Image: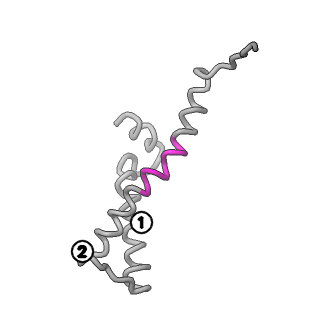
Amino acid sequence: MRDVTVRYKQTVIGVAWAIVRPFITMVIFTIVFGRLAGLPSESGAPYPVMVLAGMLPWFLFSSIPDRGIEQIVGNSNLIERSTFHA
């Protein structure tokens, strides 16, 4: 929870951005692909639920490289240059 609070403290809506971002993306994808493109939901589940089920893992895995790089840069003092003598 601390990481989420620190990450979103500079945004206008704060921690709620972690919930609002996937929701807004779900709404946009539902309008574009569900309504305008007319893509069907083959399983019979509502299209917004299917979009959200696909977007949540995407947000998780797409943020892993960014967070990893931020952690390495932020904790660069822990990484020291070591010299190996052969």
Residue 82 within the magenta-colored segment of the rendering: no
Q: Which residue is mark 1?
A: 25
Indicate whether 25 appears above or below 86: below
What's the residue at 43%, 85% (across, down)? Answer: 37
Q: Which residues are magenta?
A: 58-67
Q: Amino acid at mark 1?
A: Thr
- Quadrant of the image for the N terminus? top left
For marks 1 and 2 on the same chain, the one whose residue lies earlier in the sequence: 1
Please name which of the two marks, 1 or 2, marks the residue nearer to the observer: 2
In front here: 15 or 76?
A: 76
The quarter of the displayed image where residue 25 is located:
bottom left
Does residue 68 appear to the left or right of 8 in the view shown?
right
Q: Amino acid at mark 2?
A: Ala
Q: Which residue is mark 2?
A: 45
Residue 63 within the magenta-colored segment of the rendering: yes
Q: Position of residue 65 (x, y in %)?
A: 54, 45
Q: Position of residue 53 (x, y in %)?
A: 32, 63
